[in-house]
Amino acid sequence: MRKTMKFWIATAISLTLIQSLASAFLRRGRILSGVTDVCSSLLLLALVIAFARNAVPTRGRLRVFWTMQSIGWSVALVNQLWWMYYDVVLQRQVPMLFAGDVLLFIPGLLMLSGFLLRPHLQQSRRSARLGAVDFLLLVLWWVFLYAYLVSCWQYVSPNENLYNRNYDNLYLGEIVVIIGVLTQLIRHSSAHWRRFYALYSVAILFNYLWFALENQAIEKYTYFVGSWYDVPYLASWAAYILLAVVGGSLRLDRESDENQNDRSWMTALSIVAVLSLPVMVVIAILEPGLSVRIVHFRVLVTAFVMFAMAGLVFLKQQLLHLELKHSNLVLQWSSTTDPLTGTRNRRFFFENIQRDIAQSVRAHLESGEQTERDIVFYLIDLDNFKKINDRFGHDGGDRILIESARRISSAIRNSDLLVRWGGEEFLVVSRCTDRKQAGTLANRILDAFRSNPFQIDPAEETAQTCSIGWAAFPWYEDDVQALSYEGVLKYADRALYRAKKAGKNQAIGMVRSQEGANPVTVSDSLSEALIQAANLGRDELLESSK
């Protein structure tokens, strides 16, 4: 890294020194012009490479920033080669209304565009979408200003004095805006970036000072290639090489998204750009002394840019609409999802259960032959979970809960709903099912817990079981609306209580008794002694869920 820094610094100093010696000892002529053009071209080529190298190890908007700077210097290199063609090959003075002058304006525009990206900040998706529109609006505005103020006097109605005056004023305005943007960046950046932006400001002002002096000499026809004006002007380019060296070690300030207010000044500039267009039309029409061709050109250019900006504003509104829609979806998802396990929560259950209940009721009323029309509620409670928290701490308990949710999800169908019911308790809502198969699903959930130990950390694991209580809706198949789903949930909770009392690691279901009003306990996994110990009383043992 130090060798690279020394190389670029030596290159900048050497080329500037060669130019100084050439300006001091060579007479005005082809040789001096050739040496000056070669030194200028090599210095610009060094700038292109130096800034491009900085883009390689970076990412996001910082990479875009370095790339835009490199492209800007590439455009300046093309302009220099064009000048070199006139000086060395044609051996003529560059015309005053030179088509290549726009190539001197573009590097500043790309420089400004790079700073508008705020390269010191980590880019967020939201900022990338919305900020890109503001960025395009501002770039389009500067292109419009060049066409409106400069190009009309170069191509539509050539006028050397007005061309030079408007070009110089617009170039000065570009520099003022760049310095203003850099001032904002200095205020809102960290120390190392603040120093970089400050040095960049000094380099821009130094470069503009000698550009303005040299340009004034060109307009007065007192400049020639290789004169002393070129020495400090090349030295100002060499300063940019030093900036590329200093900036090579810069990285993003932070990894979080920037605040909404950080972008407000850029949005304000884009609004000014849009609102300025009607004013420019009025100026074009009312300005005295303008030819009809100039007025028509300016009005047409403004109308075209208006349509383009209207499209960008519409695009921004659509992006804002999509952003709002996305934010609402995220808010809705976060309000109905358990943040630890990723399962749905009680709120989601209560917001959606009525739809499932209505579908089940309709299926029972419309078809007496259909079997998969029930809803089965499974309440699942982790056994001895307090001991897990006491032994492994709450972090260990959280890992058990997360893994439990994963195992339950792997045992149930895709159409079933898994809800974090509270604490270490889960609820499975099995839709469009047959109550006669309820024990099968309970059995799969039990086996999912029993199959493998739970991994607490790479060095420790533990066994974890669960108890399940279930009940089916509708409770009365011949009178589907006689008992609400809340009542069925109470029966599932009672079944869970009995599974716990009977020794845990069991699944017990409650179904309607065909012989009386009392519900029936469904499980043959319990011995008669355990049933009596659990005070199951008159509940009848019908089938297995183990």
Image (cartoon, rainbow, N blue to C red):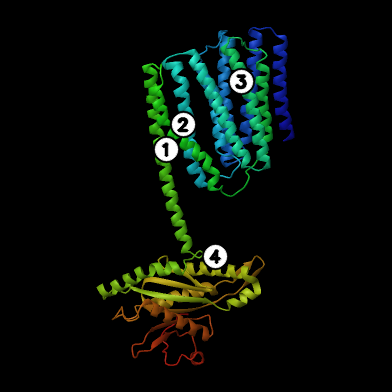
Q: Which numbered disc, 4 or 1, marks the residue that appears first in the sequence?
A: 1
Q: Residues within 10 Å of mark 4 (few under 14, many from 20)?
A: few
Residue at 63% across, 8% down = 30
- Disc 2: which residue: 140
Label 2's element? helix
Q: Which numbered disc, 3 or 4, marks the residue that appears first in the sequence?
A: 3
Q: Position of residue 354 (x, y in %)?
A: 36, 70
Observer able to see residue 412: no
- Disc 4: which residue: 340
| Amino acid at the residue labelled 1 | Leu
Q: Is residue 296 above or below residue 543?
A: above
Q: Mark 4 near mark 1, Cβ–Cβ under 8 Å?
A: no
Residue at 55% across, 36% down = 116
Q: In the depicted view, which residue is nearer to us: 78 or 312?
A: 312
Q: Mark 2 near mark 4, Cβ–Cβ under 8 Å?
A: no
Mark 2 and mark 4: Cα distance apart in space: 47 Å
Q: Quadrant of residue 186?
A: top right
Observer able to see residue 274: yes
| Amino acid at the residue labelled 3 | Phe
Q: Mark 3 near mark 2, Cβ–Cβ under 8 Å?
A: no
- Disc 1: which residue: 312
| Amino acid at the residue labelled 2 | Leu
Q: In the depicted view, which residue is nearer to us: 132 or 269?
A: 269
Q: In the depicted view, which residue is nearer to us: 524 or 250?
A: 250
- Disc 3: which residue: 211
Q: Which numbered disc, 3 or 2, marks the residue that appears first in the sequence?
A: 2
Q: Position of residue 467 (x, y in %)?
A: 51, 79
Q: Nearer the viewer, mark 2 or mark 4?
A: 2
Mark 3 and mark 4: Cα distance apart in space: 62 Å
